[in-house]
Amino acid sequence: MVIAYLRVSTGKQHLENQLEEIKNFARKRDITVDKWVTETVSGKRKKNERHLGGVMKKLKNGDSLIVTEFSRLSRTLTEIMSILGYCLEKKIYLYSIKDGYILDDSINSKVLAFAFGLVAEIEHKLISMRTKEALALRKSQGVRLGRPKGQNKKQQILIENKDKINRMLLQGDSISAICRHFKVSRDTYYTFKKNHPSKT
């Protein structure tokens, strides 16, 4: 089976150019496209959140996937690497027309996939390093990192309802009943109580 995958990010873009490129490519190589899959969605969304995820699951050993370029598969290098690795593992041919790549079971394809995989790993480490350096810099500048104590959503609910909680306690409601009423855990309640001892 041969599947052609076409994607644009917004409704203002058009699929016609990708369609013609794939048709011309298939005609020159005497390839018959069995299924055309098109969608309008950001390439930043994971493949399983797009039609592409279903396409990948349908492909089997010896099947082919055609795209105009790798960026149609994803906008993140890491996910492109994941897709390439999956295709190699399942022995699925991947044609990327503009990039001029054919991913098959040849040694050149395996070397290419290894090179891409190495780049993805390096990119991941660089992102992690930049994140750690940025956090360290902010900490050195006195910026308080993380969520302020007692300011998460559920704590805020208890704070906003502290008068009602006091009334419930005076009426003899148990802590369990209060937690059920506000849909919070006992730990959340006790944290609230610790931060507002004079009110509870």
Image: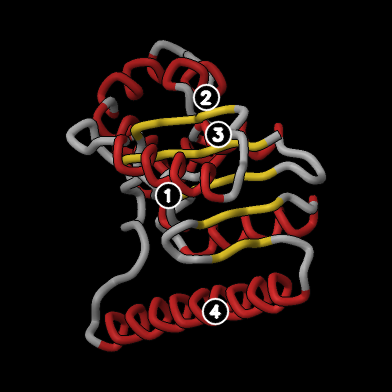
Where residue 60 appears, as percent x and y from the top left, is 78, 39
Identify the residue under disc 4.
Answer: 119
On screen, residue 76 versus residue 125, left or right, reads left
Q: Reading the chain from its start, which is encountered first: label 4 or label 2?
A: 4
Which residue is more in the foreground, 32 or 128?
32
Mark 3 surroundings: few (<14), some (14-19) or many (≥20) residues within 10 A: some
Which amino acid lies under the numbered mark 1 shown in the image of this protein? Arg
On screen, residue 179 versus residue 139, left or right, reads right
Q: Nearer the viewer, mark 1 or mark 4?
A: 1
Which residue is more in the foreground, 154 or 130?
130
Do the CB atoms of the residues marked 2 and 3 lie less than 8 Å apart?
yes
Give the residue displayed 44% in from the left and 45% down from the top: 24
Quarter of the picture holding the C terminus: top left
Identify the residue under disc 3.
Answer: 186
Where residue 67 appears, as percent x and y from the top left, is 49, 48
Identify the residue under disc 2.
Answer: 175
Q: Reading the chain from its start, which is encountered first: label 2 or label 3?
A: 2
Which amino acid lies under the numbered mark 4 shown in the image of this protein? Val
Q: Nearer the viewer, mark 2 or mark 3?
A: 3
Identify the residue under disc 1.
Answer: 72
Give the residue displayed 53% in from the left and 64% down from the top: 78
